[in-house]
């Protein structure tokens, strides 16, 4: 076998591989045996037809292609070993140059080797942790939030006008250039004034209106509005308020504490809220410190990331987004339409984050090698147990699903990444 290598743009390497004709003939023999087992040939049991019959039945080109598929993987593996390319980060692009009986096989394989990663400081990093400070105002906000959940909706007195924060129902009909437009009409539509769920300026103009009163609201659709035929255009909405309700909040006192918690006094409830807020803030501070540690270790690492790795990470991120949208009953195409964007722009918005993700991943892989961090059976069992607890299943059930879906390697990679991150966190400077 002969191999030559040429470096081209975007860190790609083109391997030109030549395999002697005798190897092709052997591969054709194996290919015919395989094909004989896959197709039905009149007069022969499966797998028993001789090579010449198989070639006539399926065609010479099919046999050659099957033979190439059999010999190419090993040839490529041997070529990479010869060129000292240990790992590649994307599926090779194969271009067959010569594939004929009696001739040496010649093909080109364009590969992207895993980039060289030079670690900087990742141990003993000095990362300041944010101080945790829960104020009386923070506790009061929590109390008010609890009170808001227990509020009663009360009809406004007769003759009352809409105020900011009120809950209304209204009829409306929108017009652009004097013509009603599709989707611009609603009946008994619920709207909280001040929620900013309508076009900017719409809700403010309803303040002061009374039940049964018709009011014209003049607005301009935002330039980035999802309906392109309305974007940037002035509109008039004819609105009629049908009902006005407001929240009646409970008084925050000992009785409130008894009704909304296990505590007998407001002071006890406040103390518990403070403790929980401090725990949450402590967790946020820990997470922020860890995030900064990873960012610092990544920034200290030197690596030239191949564009294909970033593209693949963008694709992965968009697939994750697509799955989240599907859980909410929405398709990606609908989201793009509502957001007034397209897939190319969406990919571009993800590129910076994707590159950071790839750089961090490469740094963690290199740290794992440098520190000889391994994944053991007990690590996998622990991760499976955590997953089982999260999904309300047994570890045995979760493990069965992982094995059936062939995701054991993915699980091991996740565990290795987590162990390596923990190593960095455990070795922060005091």
Image: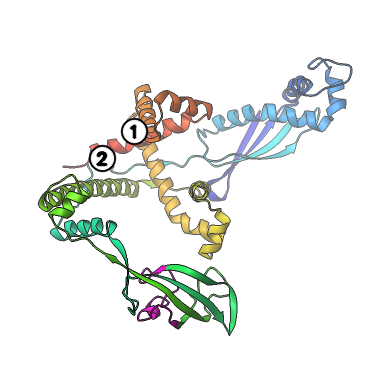
**Tag 1's secondary structure?**
helix
Classified by dominant secondary structure, the portion drawn in magenta counts as loop
Q: Where residue 337 appears, x then y in whole percent?
A: 56, 62
Residue at 84% in and 17% down: 50
Identify the magenta region: 191-214
The reply to whether the C-beta atoms of the residues labelled 2 and 1 are less than 8 Å apart is no
Relative side of 261 to 209, left or right: left
What quarter of the picture does the C terminus occupy? top left
How would you rate the neighbour count of disc 1 (Cα within 10 Å): few for under 14, some for 14-19, many for 20 or more? few
Say above or below: 209 vs 23: below
**Residue that numbered label 1 is attached to:** 370
The one nearer the camera, 180 or 37, is 180
**Residue that numbered label 2 is attached to:** 425
The one nearer the camera, 227 or 172, is 172
How would you rate the neighbour count of disc 2 (Cα within 10 Å): few for under 14, some for 14-19, many for 20 or more? many
**Tag 2's secondary structure?**
helix
Sequence-earlier tag: 2 or 1? 1
């Amino acid at each position: 076998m002969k191999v030559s290598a040429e470096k081209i743009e975007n860190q790609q390497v083109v391997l030109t591989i030549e395999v002697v004709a005798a190897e092709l003939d052997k591969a054709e023999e194996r290919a015919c045996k395989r094909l004989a087992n896959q197709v039905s040939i009149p007069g022969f049991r499966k797998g028993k037809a001789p090579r010449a019959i198989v070639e006539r039945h399926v065609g010479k080109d099919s046999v050659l292609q099957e033979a190439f598929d059999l010999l190419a993987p090993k040839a490529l593996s041997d070529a990479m070993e010869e060129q000292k390319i240990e790992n590649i980060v994307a599926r090779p692009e194969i271009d067959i140059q010569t594939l004929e009986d009696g001739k040496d096989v010649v093909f080109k394989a364009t590969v992207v080797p895993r980039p060289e990663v030079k670690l900087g400081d990742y141990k003993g990093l000095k990362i300041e942790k944010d101080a945790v400070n829960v104020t009386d105002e923070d506790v009061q906000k929590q109390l008010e939030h609890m009170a808001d959940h227990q509020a009663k909706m009360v009809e406004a007195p007769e003759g009352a006008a809409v105020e900011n924060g009120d809950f209304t129902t209204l009829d409306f009909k929108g017009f652009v250039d004097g013509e009603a437009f599709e989707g611009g009409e609603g009946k008994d539509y619920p709207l909280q004034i001040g929620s900013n769920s309508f076009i900017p300026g719409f809700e403010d103009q309803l303040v002061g209106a009374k039940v049964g009163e018709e009011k014209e609201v003049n607005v301009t659709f935002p330039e980035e509005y999802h309906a392109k035929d309305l974007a940037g255009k002035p509109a008039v909405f004819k609105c009629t308020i049908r009902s006005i309700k407001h929240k009646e909040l409970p008084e925050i006192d000992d009785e409130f504490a008894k009704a909304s918690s296990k505590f007998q006094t407001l002071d006890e409830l406040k103390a518990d809220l403070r403790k929980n807020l401090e725990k949450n803030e402590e967790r946020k501070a820990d997470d922020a410190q860890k995030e900064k540690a990873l960012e610092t270790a990544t920034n200290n690492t030197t690596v030239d990331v191949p564009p294909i790795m970033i593209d693949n990470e963008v694709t992965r991120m968009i697939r994750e987004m697509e799955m989240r949208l599907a859980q909410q009953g929405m398709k990606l195409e609908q989201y793009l339409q509502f957001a007034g964007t397209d897939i190319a722009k969406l990919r571009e918005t993800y590129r910076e984050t994707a590159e950071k993700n790839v750089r961090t991943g490469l740094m963690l892989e290199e740290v794992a090698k440098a520190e000889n961090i391994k994944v053991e059976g007990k690590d996998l069992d622990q991760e499976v147990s955590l997953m089982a607890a999260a999904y309300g299943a047994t570890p045995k059930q979760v493990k069965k699903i992982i094995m059936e879906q062939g995701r054991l390697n993915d699980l091991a990679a996740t565990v290795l990444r987590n162990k390596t991150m923990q190593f960095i966190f455990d070795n922060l400077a005091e």
